[in-house]
Image (spheres, rainbow, N blue to C red):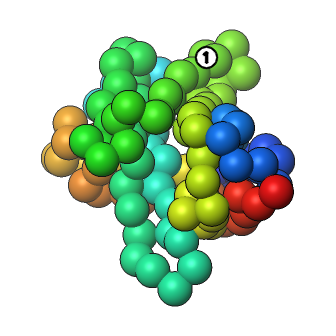
Amino acid sequence: QVQLQESGPGLVKPSQTLSLTCTVSGGSITTSYLAWSWIRQPPGKGLEWMGAIGYVGNTYYSPSLRSRTSISRDTSKNQFSLQLTSVTPEDTAVYYCARVSGSNWYTFRYGMDYWGKGTLVTVSS
């Protein structure tokens, strides 16, 4: 059973960088034909896909967040991470990590089958 767990600070100050890590168990992030995504949900709003990293380490980002987003991985720890720079209160959200698999895995966003429980990050001074 694949499990994902988000971790990181729950409070970030405006203009700082939000950093989160997703630890994957029960499967390897280097397994072929998989991608690993970050998604967020601001309070009272819908889900927003932020970006993902593929099994070979290539990345793809939402155009609206590309300038502020970076996704990386540590294969030795079976983890992938999110960095979001220059945060504002509008970046307050529950942040999720998820696995992308299936026939549409190459989209990096369609076909999420395993999700973390999510972690609330509040941007406030």
* Residue 2 vertical position relative to residue 15 in the rendered view, above or below: below
Q: Position of residue 5 (x, y in %)?
A: 71, 50
- SS class of the residue under badge 1? loop
Residue occupying image coordinates x 58% and y 38%: 86
Q: Residues within 10 Å of mark 1 (few under 14, many from 20)?
A: few
| Camera sees residue 26 | no
Tell whether 90 sits left or right of 62: right
Residue occupying image coordinates x 34% and y 19%: 58
In the figure, residue 17 lies in which quadrant?
A: top right
Q: Quadrant of the C terminus?
A: bottom right
In the figure, residue 80 lies in which quadrant?
A: top right
Q: Which residue is mark 1?
A: 75
In the figure, residue 62 lies in which quadrant?
A: top left
Q: How many numbered marks appear?
A: 1
Tell whether 113 sits left or right of 90: left
Between 80 and 84, the residue placed more toward the observer is 84
Residue occupying image coordinates x 53% and y 22%: 72
Tell whether 97 sits left or right of 57: right
Q: Residue furthest bottom?
A: 44
Q: Position of residue 27 (x, y in %)?
A: 57, 36
Residue occupying image coordinates x 65% and y 26%: 78
Residue type indicated by callout 1: Thr
Q: Position of residue 37 (x, y in %)?
A: 44, 44
| Camera sees residue 73 | yes
Q: Position of residue 105 (x, y in %)?
A: 25, 42
